[in-house]
Amino acid sequence: MKEISQKIENRDVSTSALATFDNENPLLDNVRPIPTLQEAMRLTEQRDFTDDAGWSPQERITQGVAGAYVTDAGRATVLVNAIVQIWSSLRDRDLRSAAYRNYAIVANDLLHRRVSKGRKTFPSRFCIAPHAKPRGIMVAAPVNLGQRRLADVVASEVGCEPLVTRVRTPAGISEYLQLGCVRVSWPINGGLPGFAQGFFGAFDAAFNDEYARITHSPLFRERDIIPAICALVVASNLGLLIVDGINVQSATASAADNVWSALAQITRTTGVPILCLPTPGAAALSVAKLPDAVGALTTTGITEIHPYRSPRDPRWPAVCLSIFDRTVRLAGVAAMPAWLIDAAYDLTLGYPGLLAKALTAIALDLVALNTNLFTPEVFIRQGTRALMLDQPHLDAIRIIRQGGSYRPSSLIRHGDWLSLSQLASTHLMPELS
């Protein structure tokens, strides 16, 4: 893969993976072993690496709360499934196989020679890889439940730095690039060109290249996007693609169906796993109406992460303590009061992101006023003020949890906050004549 190797000559590429393998798939040597659920729980637990020496209390509060995260079996399972799918995919993409090696060479040639020379034509299709099968992983989680941190953890454990590996072939030893993970945000307008620019930009950051600029030229058309992405995925031996930031508004835009269909086609064509992190509303109201996309992007079913059901949930006190330690404790309150567990649930209904927002605002006020007065009255008054923009959603969730029948429009309006079961009535049902 000479061309793509030249593309990163200015990048600090790790050479720790430079080795020759005769009896093993060389790409698998760079993938961490599949963890047990208990190991995944440990890997996804909160870890702080920031050196905050010399920081002000306000800086410590705002920085610390951004990393507050409490794992559980559901989140740990997401990491396990991602690594399992990476192993399965790379076993099929074995560079010792002449058929797959030739396929990878063609992908590299298609991407670099046709685009870099500025030709007006680009293949509208990219053939399916040998042994390729779809490997979609979908995790639906309402807002304010740590989706961003979950994506951070998975990306960190998989690895986002390019490596170089050597493969012994009948013609000698060849060098290949391998990229563990690429993370892309869902486009704001839900369009395929926006997704493509984010995708190519992510590769530019990894390889110090200019794919985003090259593919943004007038010679590069929307029909060229999927073949170009597939070619780049294959040429870089990508382990996992993560797509996050998928909400109701962006996923129900008129052009969003094209992005879902593109993701399905990419994983079908290349066999590369794709981890999608939509809100339940985005999953129920957007991708659910595209059977082909659902089939490719939920090959292991759909995993759902729920808000905490009550203050008696054994994980909720741990959530409160984790956020308290990174906010109010830093403002001078020595220990978390027992009353906070129930009060925090009453205010936030079990959404950790809302508790983090409320306690951050309170901690900053305590520092500014040079006081450590933290009472239930202070928490309710200042916490409610911090969540003013979220209050309509919280009020709706309280009503919906009480049961009853609601208009689909009401559920859709709050679809980023609700569970799939709560959104069930929005699905189209057959009408009796």
Image: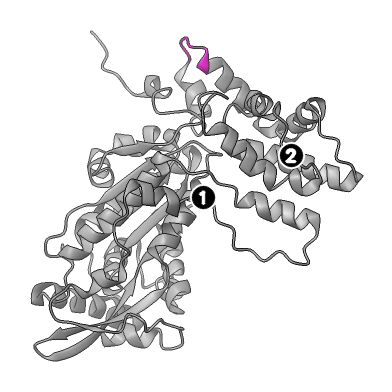
**Label 1 crowd bin: few (<14), some (14–19), many (20+), radius 10 Å:** some
Numbered tag placed on residue 320 in the rendering? none
Magenta: predominant secondary structure element?
loop
Q: CA distance from mark 1 to mark 2?
A: 28 Å
Local SS, label 1:
helix
Residue shown at 42%/34% (left/top)? 280
Q: Nearer the viewer, mark 1 or mark 2?
A: 2
Residue shown at 36%/73% (left/top)? 219
The residue tagged 1 is 148
Query: Which span of residues is magenta-colored?
Result: 401-406
Three-letter amino acid code at the position of disc 2: Ala
Q: Residue 301, how many percent across, how many down?
A: 27, 38
Residue shown at 38%/19% (left/top)? 425
The quarter holding residue 122 reads bottom left
Q: In the figure, 117 relative to 330: above or below?
A: below
Q: Residue 215, how many percent across, how many down?
A: 39, 71
Residue shown at 46%/32% (left/top)? 306
Three-letter amino acid code at the position of disc 1: Arg
